Amino acid sequence: MKRRNLIFGMAAVGMSATYPALLAAQPTREALLAPGPLPEKSFGPDDASVTIIEYASLTCPIAAPFM
């Protein structure tokens, strides 16, 4: 057995063991729409039938110029 296969196998076992917990820890819609430290930007009517939530990072060199 190669060391690389052992490392990948251990990673796969660890990820498969935590995957159900990650699915159960999904945030609610209210938690996602709660105000954060940055001001909110919204377009369109508040009662629209579709809500799109965009995530961005100020530390990302590609996303930061668009914010």
Image: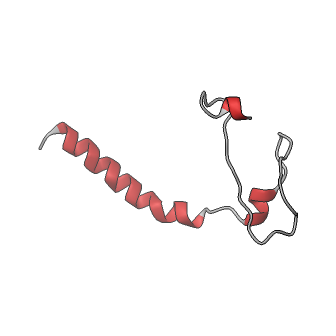
Query: Which residue is at the front of the view, 39 or 4?
Result: 39
2 shown above or below 19: above
Name the spot of residue 46 as percent of width and height, x first. Answer: 88, 64
Q: Is residue 59 above or below residue 28?
A: above
Q: Quadrant of the C terminus?
A: top right
Q: Residue at x 64, y 34 (%)?
A: 63
- Residue sitting at x 84%, y 59%: 44
What residue is shown at x 54% (from left), y 65% (from top)? 23
Q: Position of residue 2 (x, y in %)?
A: 14, 40
Q: Among all residues in the image, which is located at the extreme bottom?
A: 49
- Taking depth in this image into account, of 16 and 36 the one nearest to the observer is 36
Give the residue at the far front of this rendering: 44
Where residue 45 appears, as percent x and y from the top left, is 87, 63
Q: Is residue 65 visible?
A: yes
Report the coloring of the rendering: secondary structure
Q: Is residue 13 above or below residue 66?
A: below
Q: Quadrant location of residue 53? A: bottom right
Q: Residue at x 61, y 62 (%)?
A: 25
Return the residue nearer the eye: 54 or 38. Answer: 54
Is residue 58 visible to the viewer in this orientation of the structure? Answer: no
